[in-house]
Image: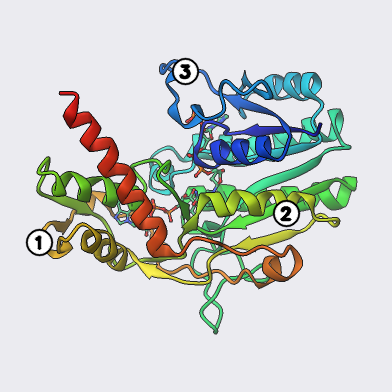
Amino acid sequence: MKKAFITGIAGQDGSYLSEYLLELGYEVHGMVRRNSVAENQQSRLNAVRLNPNFFAHYGDLTDQTSIERLLTEINPDEIYNLGAQSHVRVSFDVPQYTVQANALGVINMLEAYKRISPQAKFYQASSSEMFGLTVEDDGYQRETSVMNPVSPYGCAKVFGYNIVRHYRRAYNLHATNGILFNHESPRRGSNFVTNKVVKTACQIKLGLTDKLELGNMDSYRDWGHSKDYVRAMHKVINHDEADDFCISTMETHSVREMCDVVFKYLDLDYKDYVSQNPIYMRPEELPYLKGDSTKARTTLDWKPTYTFEEMMHEMCDHWLDVLQNIESTR
Ligand code: NAP
Ligand code: G4F
């Protein structure tokens, strides 16, 4: 039985990756941070917490000793470093912490990996936010595009990406980067734009509120589904040669178009409810993302299964269900 160790296991991707690997027959170990919410209330892990092959351990990416202890105890075959302060807007408010978790956290992981379990394979959750302002002449970003980040989050992720490549070459480690474009799901944190729009639109539909305030509605993102992207992570780490791969749908939509899709599904017109509030604007914005995932599609035989509309509709159905259940228990 293969053993996987996942940081950020209580997050969106960590929870789906755990389910995917358990289905494949892995023993799954995950790092969770202590917080004020009891572990059994971290609902993203509901589907796995009682599985006999699932183990959650306390640790923190900024605490090197906790990482070393866990790698020594677990001795994993595959290490997925998904833990991060993952909110770009928040990274402008907490830049130093973002660098500690998203940049120094990666080197903490790599040092422990190199010393304690160098036989394992390593996956780093790199991000399309690293490309920042770069758009190639054909409208895409790809593995060869210049990194030109526009946020503390993006800068920290560029460090993580580069240090993984350095450890791969310098110490002959199987250390990989998945450069994932935005991916969403019903488990997405509700302060990211897709889930914020869906949750509030469903509240409007049910008469619970009558307005939605957003920041920049004219930025474009390449939005895929987290379930498709965790399959890609497993393919990236298991490719014979350690390498870097962009994972994307190869389509892009504006925040405005996304609002239109969501409100239309609920028989509403977003223009009647949405306004812009400068408090949600960023000091510097990344205006346009569209990823070229040809390398992953041809080398790894990966492709997404969800369309953008299917994903947004799934998120709407989820929130309608949750909100109606809350209402019926009042
Ligand atoms: P998420 O839902 O925010 O999950 C991140 C997880 O990291 C959370 O469980 C969080 O713990 C944990 N974490 C934060 N700081 C930590 C620390 N100091 N030590 C240990 N764990 C820590 O994010 P996600 O969407 O699943 O994304 C997973 C990874 O992919 C992240 O690295 C993100 O930056 C990267 N990424 C995401 C996307 C995307 O569109 N989703 C795209 C590209 C790259 P708590 O639950 O305790 O807060
Ligand atoms: O949903 P977002 O906050 O995601 P963002 O900034 O693209 O970052 C996500 O994707 C990255 C991959 O490219 C990941 F690395 C990162 O961890 C994260 O998962 O914002 C998307 C767009 C932005 O242009 C933002 O300015 O939506 C715009 N937006 C407009 N109004 C808003 C809002 N974003 C948020 N969060 N909240 C708003 O009210």
Question: Disc 2 residue type?
Answer: Val
Whichever of labels 1 and 2 marks the residue nearer the N terminus, that label is: 2
Q: Position of residue 135 (x, y in %)?
A: 52, 75
In the rendered structure, which disc, 3 or 2, sits on the residue that comes first in sequence?
3
Look at label 1 and name its amino acid: Asp
How far apart are the two marked residues, 3 and 1, measured between alpha carbons? Answer: 40 Å
Image coords of residue 45 (percent x, y): 51, 28
Foreground pick, 298 / 132: 298
Few, some or many residues within 10 Å of mark 1 (<14, 14–19, 20+) = few
Q: Which residue is mark 2?
A: 236
Mark 3 highlights which residue?
40
SS at mark 3? helix
Q: Nearer the viewer, mark 3 or mark 1?
A: 3
Image mark for residue 272: 1
Q: Residue at x 85, y 31 (%)?
A: 117
| Residue 228 location (% of width, % of height) | 57, 54
Position of the C terminus by quadrant: top left
> Which amino acid type is marked by label 3?
Asn
